[in-house]
Amino acid sequence: MVVTCTFKHIHLIKSVIMKRIIIYITNVALLSGIFFGCNNFLEVDTPKDLMDQEMVFNDDATAVSAVTNIYSLLRNSGFLAGNNTGIGLLMGCYTDELQVTAPGITDQTWFYQLNVISSNNAVKRLWDTSYQQLYQVNAAIEGLEKSQVLTKENKEQLLGECYFVRALLLFYLNRTFGEVPYVVLTDYQINKNIARTPQAEIDRLLITDLENSIALLKDGYPSSLRTRPNRSAANLLLARIALYSGDWNKAMETSANVLSNTAYSLEDLDKLFYAESRSTVWHLRTLNDAASTFEVQTYFFESVPPPNVALAEGFLDVFSEEDLRKYEWVREVEGASGNFAHAYKYKKRSAVQPMEFSIVLRIEEAYLINAEANARIGRFDEAAEALNAVRNRAGLSNFYANDTASWVDAVLEERRKEFFTEFGHRFYDLKRTGKLNVLQLVKPNWTSHFEKLPLPQTELQLNPNLLPQNAGY
């Protein structure tokens, strides 16, 4: 029997095969995340059987699938997870944003009670998960750089995304643990004995990765709903890093680059966390469009006592009565055991409610970075324009001062009200400005060494090059 294939048939067959390859690669990437979860990042050898670079990165569709799968890993675990394992909840408990209401000893209880030690599961999980995710990023970079067949536009976009994600992960590792290994390779023989990278070199490498990302990415988004980073996302992270390191001019310039993108504007408070929010610079998609965010599942409660955490006692006092965020982003619940409040930024609890994704970067941060950077160099009028844009949207009157110290305090207070329960902003802001001691007002046993988490004890045992342990642990 002779089978005749027309061009249409061939195209259809090719399409079916490609879809199967994409499904296979996606499942492989998901499995690799599961397998990595059972190992220490220093023990992981290159899983050539799990991520065949030649196959994955020699086709545009499978390359996109491999890289975008990394965002699912970020959403599900590690620093950016909106659940009990993420930095938003852990550092909210660690500082003065949240109180633990769940019975028994949990990871958040250790953070809430300032009993974080090198053997805590949460500490090890943050470290291991982040380096496992970094492995995926570095494997993608290596595969993309080797590929000779991807379209130039797609290759540059994907490389730009990977450089951005690598900088983001290492930024959080560095600001949480102090000097850490800046891992850029997948070679097991190198990684198993790697030493901590000096802070000055970490700063240089973060900037290099982000400048590479900015050069490769475009102003527009490669996908709908801003679920993949663009040039503005990389500029905003670079502005944050510049602010943290005291480079006020770079912080001012890069945040201004983001603000100049007309795709963004200050969204109404009641719609800010919608998937189509005009404030969003980059967010992580939920499991499906009908699903709620992990933040809803973590913070929302309808009866008391709360089953997990609640906003700290007295936290509502940071808002004036005129501040609309107090009414839009906070919900109080009364009961026989007392009154509690929870973060109410994310509201979607059923499929019929508007779609929400977990926002990692939003335009409000660019405004507040720009305000602080301008204030630091004495440009008070420019600082006022940026700060008051955020204040006015919240229903507050204009602020103005004639000294830098008052400006910095005002911006920090605005950041506290704007970013509560979002990825540990409160902790990192207090740390970078040398103000962590204010936590002694609510946590009398707070000491200076709590500014860094301990390195996991298992890591130090496996790799003595990571010694010494952070001071105080």
Image (spheres, grey):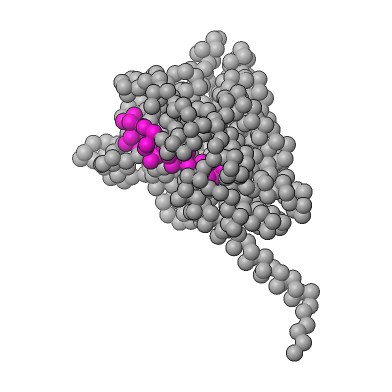
User: Residue, x 68% and y 50% (percent of image)?
Assistant: 143
Answer above or below: position of 99 versus 369: below
* Residue 165, quarter of picture: top right
Residue 294 spot, x, y in % from top left: 44, 47
Query: In this figure, what is the number of numbered marks?
Result: 0
Residue 324 in sight from this viewpoint: no
The answer to which of 467 and 352 lies nearer the viewer is: 467
The answer to which of 203 and 359 lies nearer the viewer is: 203
User: Residue, x 56% and y 55% (percent of image)?
Assistant: 29
Whether residue 107 sits left or right of residue 151 in the image: it is: left
* Residue 416, quarter of picture: top left
> Magenta segment, principal secondary structure?
helix
The verdict on residue 123 being magenta is yes
Answer above or below: position of 425 versus 105: above
The answer to which of 417 and 390 lies nearer the viewer is: 417
The verdict on residue 111 being magenta is yes
Residue 469 spot, x, y in % from top left: 44, 28
Extreme residue toward the left, this view? 336
Whether residue 63 sits left or right of residue 174 in the image: it is: right
Residue 456 spot, x, y in % from top left: 43, 36
Quadrant assignment for the C terminus? top left
Quadrant assignment for the N terminus? bottom right
Residue 149 in sight from this viewpoint: yes
Q: Which residues are magenta?
A: 108-134
Extreme residue toward the bottom, this view? 1
